[in-house]
Structure formats: structure tokens, C-alpha cells
Amino acid sequence: MTGAGRAVPIAIGGGLGLAISAVDNLAAGGHVSPVVIVALLLAATAAIGGWAGWTAWPAALAVCLPVPGVHLVKHALGLPDTIQPNTYDSIAMMALFSAAVAGAGFVAGVLLRQALSDSTS
């Protein structure tokens, strides 16, 4: 994928990440079960992996960055947040967990894409 061709999946990934972050921060008064966020991250990154393949890994990364990013901004500005404890360490752990979930979803999507293309050949 060229630079211009890579921009579209990254923009889509970033948009999906912002939407997931909005669900995390705005739905039900600002608190959503982490299971919902994990499911949304898995679904979004699996869809990207299935759609664009291995070269779309930056798009999967773009999906997972806004979730801890919003918590980081809220913490830095001193705004109330649902993450407990609201510390930089817990936000860093959330970022690592989000990246692991996004990676798992992305790999699952790519492997499904490859399995389906192998079966139709």
C-alpha cells in the first residue's frame, strides 16, 4: 500500500477509535462496562484486518490510541474521569491493554481474510 493508499485505512481506524472513545466517555453518564469497549475494539480491528490485510496495521493502532488518549487528556487537565485509580500508571496500563486487544482483533481479521481467500482459490 502506498502512502496515499494507507491514509484511508488510518483515517477510518482513527474515526472508529474516536467513536469507541465517545462510547466509553459519553454513554450512560460516562461509564460503560470495559467488556463493551473490548468487544468494540476487537470488532473494529478485526474488520480492518479482514478488509485491508497486514499492511493496515497502522489503522489498527489508530483504533486503539483514542481510548487511553482521552483519559490521558482528562487526567492532564484535572477533569473527573471514570478510570480508577486515575493515575498515569493506570492510563499506561490501559494503553497497553488496548494495544493488545487491538492486535489480537487485527490478527484474527487478517487470518480470517487469508483463510477465506485460500478456500476460494
Image: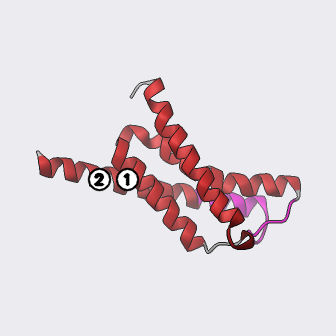
Task: Say what secondary structure mark 2 lies in.
Answer: helix
Q: Which residue is mark 1?
A: 107
Write the residue at 75% across / 70% down. Answer: 82
Residue 11: mark in rendering: none
- In the rendered structure, the answer to whether residue 87 lies left or right of residue 32 reads right
Q: Is residue 87 magenta?
A: yes
Q: Residue 84: x percent and y percent? A: 75, 72
Residue 30 against residue 20 in the figure, above or below: below
Q: Are marks 1 and 2 in contact (CB under 8 Å)?
A: yes
Q: Which mark is residue 111?
A: 2
For label 2, count other residues whose C-alpha is less than 10 Å away and answer few (under 14), some (14-19) or many (20+): some
Q: Residue at x 60, y 54 (%)?
A: 19
Residue 11 position, x and y percent, is 54, 38
Gap between marks 1 and 2 measured at Cα: 6 Å
Label 1 residue SS? helix
72 lies above or below 40: above
Placement of 104 over or under 62, stated as above or below: below
The magenta stretch spans which residues?
Answer: 79-96
Classify the position of the C terminus by image quarter.
top left
